[in-house]
Image (spheres, helix red, strand yellow):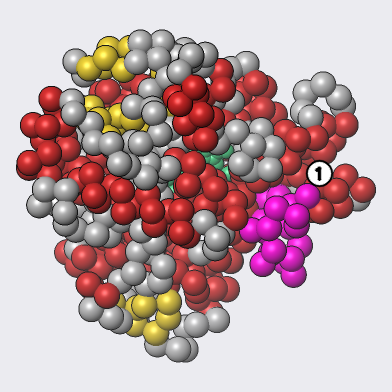
Amino acid sequence: MSVTDELRQIAVGNRQSEQHNQCAVRLRAAIFVVGSEKIMSDSVYQQGNASLNNASDQFSDNPFPLFQQMRAIGPIVPMPSSYGTTMWMITRMDEGIQVLKDAQRFTVDPRTVAVDDPKKRRSMDQMATGGFFGGPSMLDVDEPDHARLRTLVSKAFTPRYIEGLRPRIQSLADELLDQVQDQGEIDLVSDFAYPLPINVICDILGVPPNERDQIGYSSYLDRLVRNKRATPQDDLISQLVRIEEEGDRLSEAELRGMVGLLIFAGHETTSNLIGNGTVALLDNPDQMARLKADPSLIASAVEELLRYSAPVVTPIPRFAREDVQIGGQTIHKGDVVLVAIASANRDEGQFDDPEELDLARQVNKHIAFGQGIHYCLGAPLARLEGQIAFTTLLRRMPNLRLNVPRSHLVWRGEMNLRGLVSLPVAF
Ligand code: HEM
């Protein structure tokens, strides 16, 4: 299968899964709406296409051989798109950072780029993520709105506040494992990797425990925000409601967008880190043994699992505001650029033995949390959750092993977030 076919299949998979999960999938679909008929005739692409024809691994299980081949083609590779917009994939670290840091010339909001071609215009508008979380959010606006929204919530996400969550996250992790400890086998995704982060973010936002199964529904989030406004409590949504009521700093739509973003960004990504990270440890028993023998390695282990296991493969698309030269290519105004974080994190020019998992890696400047103004707001929280999750899991289930053949693991098959449907393990 060629890379074009592969990318096309991934795109189709995305659109099919859209029925299942409202909020999260809307972002995914927006990122990968590339049902392609037109294949780029760019010379770089032509050159590389032959070598990509053999890339047949199922993408989200193992996208890394494909990325390795794309890096060999160059730091920037044209992608198939039938929507009138040219799409580019950035495969290497330096160029990836260049794009993510250049918020002047690359916007997350295509509506701010004036283009005359109606087909290109339509395509760009289709890819806009604006409002996907129920209102405008910091992730889909540029400065100065971005800084205003981010500053409001950053006040709550202080290092002290995050560190204060440690006992609660630890007791959640223990409670989840208490419930299954006698069973001898579990689905690590549904029993641990999924409920841990979702409960942490629900605690932060003040979602009552008996309502947590409803947070995927937009109508529920509307109601939740209304209830917090009527009866504010000691939680993040109530704090934001107070700010909204102070007037010109946060509109009602922005408050709703903020809540939607925090829920979306705060759980699936971290679930993927825990699930994918566990598979990476099971695939590398020497590394798992090393961590069990020396739990003080946990901070560097989580950094390596962030780099290696690719919970986020690509962040949201960037759109060129003007013609820009990158990696020897001209990106034209209105073109879409996807930074393959998962590929940059295995860039041979940046890491020794990038395809190896090394939990004690000394130099590890990964970009799993992005770069620039949209750098992950929740990075300290995600790190803390990851550290507690892996430490608790290995301490309580030291004999952890896969309960199905490795090839039977089912991945969700998305392009931008890499995660498992389930992870059957015995212990
Ligand atoms: C392993 C877990 C996580 C990973 C790998 C991750 C990754 C990322 C990445 C790559 C971005 C940048 C997106 C872009 O530039 O388009 C981002 C942004 C963001 N993340 Fe995370 N994230 C994780 C966990 C969390 C958590 C727990 C929260 C909790 C609140 C969170 C909240 C956010 C927010 C609010 C943004 C938008 C920041 C902005 O636009 O300024 N993330 N994340």
Q: Is residue 100 above or below residue 127?
A: above
What residue appears at the point 68 percent right and 50 percent down from the top-left corner? 204
Q: Position of residue 263 (x, y in %)?
A: 62, 50
Q: Left or right of 116: which side holds 6?
A: left
Front one among 368 and 8: 8
- Is residue 172 inside the magenta stretch? no
The image quadrant that residue 155 belongs to is top right
- Of residues 185 and 22, the one nearer the viewer is 22
Q: Residue at coordinates 35% horizontally, 36% vertically from top-left?
A: 82
- Residue 26 seen in the figure: yes
> Quadrant of residue 189 in the image?
bottom left
Q: Is residue 46 above or below residue 211?
A: above
Secondary structure, mark 1, is: helix
Q: Which residues are magenta?
A: 202-222
Image quadrant where one finds the C terminus: bottom left
Indicate left or right for 69 with 170 as reference.
Answer: left
The residue to which callout 1 is attached is 238
Which quadrant does the N terminus fall into?
A: bottom left
Asked if residue 206 lies in the magenta stretch, the reply is yes
Q: Is residue 11 above or below residue 408?
A: above
State left or right for residue 151 relative to residue 118. right
> In the image, what residue type sits under mark 1?
Ser
Query: x%, y% of residue 261?
Result: 61, 43
Which image quadrant is residue 197 in?
A: bottom right
Give neighbour class at mark 1: few <14, some 14-19, many 20+ (Cα, 10 Å): many
Q: Is residue 373 left or right of residue 312?
A: right
- Name the chief secondary structure element in magenta: helix
Q: Please name the residue shown 43% across and 42% down the image.
A: 33
Number of labelled discs? Answer: 1
Residue 340 or residue 192, whichever sits in front: 340
* Residue 290 picture location, percent across and down: 22, 61
Query: Most extreme residue toward the right, as rendered?
Result: 230
